[in-house]
Amino acid sequence: MTYGVSGGWAASGSVAGRNYSAFAVRGNTGNILQGAPNFVAAAGIMTGQAAAPTQIDLQVGVSSSSDGTLTRYSAVLVPSAPSVVKSQIVVLSDIHIGDNTKTVWYQRSVHEPYLLGIFDWIVTNAANIRELVLAGDIVDFWTYPFGTRPPTFATIAAQNPNIFGPTGLGRVLDALGGKVTYLPGNHDMAVTASDVASITSPGGHHVTLVDGPYFPLGADDHRIVITHGHDYTIFNAPDASSKWSPLPLGHFVTRMIATQTDKNLPPGKTVADLGGQGNPNSMDLLPIVNPVVAGLIGGIGTGMQQALKLFNDLPSALLNQIEAFSGTKDTDPITLADGTTTTLPEVRTVYANLVRRWSQQNDPQFAAKSTLADANGRYWAGSHNGSPSRSERSWW
């Protein structure tokens, strides 16, 4: 029912900073000549300062002009909680959690307290956080010696229950209402939707898997884009042409380095005890790729033709250089995640046309810049065929 009302208001002391205000309203339902209207009267006290009362004590009376009945109501009104705009997106990447064997970069005994500290911060500030995005290489299927079968996601989760269990990501899931998204990178490109859905919370939420690039504000809102960055780096992008699709050449390079590290680590030590972990491959790859790509990026000429030939042979040259550095041998069996084995000669054959494919799909200069982006992030691959610019800061 709608009432036409008028009223009055008075403030205690009538000065700024008042603590109480009193008001009264009165009115009726309309034209008395058209029937017997109801009348309303209300009085109340507002507690609080200025235009932000903490509560209103309200007394309302409604009388009927037809039978003279009077009904009274009383209520306490309180302001609704102010709406909070969740304006923050937390992005984590390149944690490289594995089975805690010595060649895995993440070591539970060293790194877990720091990661749990980040989770604590997210839970504490959840009112302002709209989403946690796990932007690739959260788990690691690559950093294992030739003779070790890489673990499954389930094995990694079981080896790190404080991270993947209900008091770790489970607690974050509930704090964010389930808004935790997993975007794979290169070291975890084999992760599946069912893998990440196994990370659940006491409140019934689970992690969601998405493909990159990911637009957290919605598919049509491109103000923010998140990608791991490996897709446009030549040795670490998923390779659909590989016998072991989607494994790229970079997987086998990482396995070679892990094999060398496994042999050289002192007893009782892990890679977390080594210095120079900003360059975990322990070697500078730029001398290998720089002479090859310089002519391609510099322009057309006789030097470019020679550079193009060298560039096409780069996968084999890279494997040869790292084989010599790591002490691995062509006859060493490489155990893959499915339990099958291969060797470096087969790897050379499978990826022999990698550079040619990239050059044909894009162009030689684009492929060359993608190679340097793979080496140290010096070059961005650039926008090509409508795709956003992307590069990986770290070779591995």
Image (cartoon, rainbow, N blue to C red):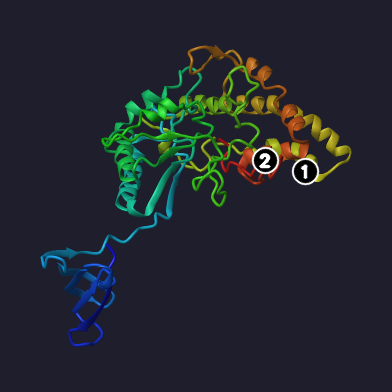
- The x, y position of residue 300, in whole percent, is 86, 41
Q: Secondary structure at mark 2?
A: helix
Q: Of marks 2 and 1, which one's residue comes earlier in the chain? A: 1
Q: Nearer the viewer, residue 310 or 241?
A: 241
Image quadrant holding the N terminus, namely bottom left
Dividing the picture into quarters, in which one does residue 39 lie? bottom left
Residue 102 got which mark? none
CA neighbours of label 2 inside 10 A, class few (<14), some (14 to 19), many (20+): many
- The x, y position of residue 78, in whole percent, is 21, 64
The residue type indicated by label 2 comes to Leu
- The x, y position of residue 37, in whole percent, is 22, 68
Q: Nearer the viewer, residue 101 or 72?
A: 72
Give the residue at mark 2. 372
Q: In the picture provided, is 126 more to the left or to the right than 344?
A: left
Residue 297 got which mark? 1
Is 211 located above or below residue 316 in the figure? below
Q: Are marks 2 and 1 in contact (CB under 8 Å)?
A: yes
Dividing the picture into quarters, in which one does residue 239 lie? top right
- The x, y position of residue 121, in whole percent, is 33, 50
The residue type indicated by label 1 comes to Ile
Is 57 located above or below residue 10 in the figure? above
Q: In the picture provided, is 378 more to the left or to the right than 363?
A: left
The residue furthest right is 302
Q: Nearer the viewer, residue 82 or 254?
A: 82
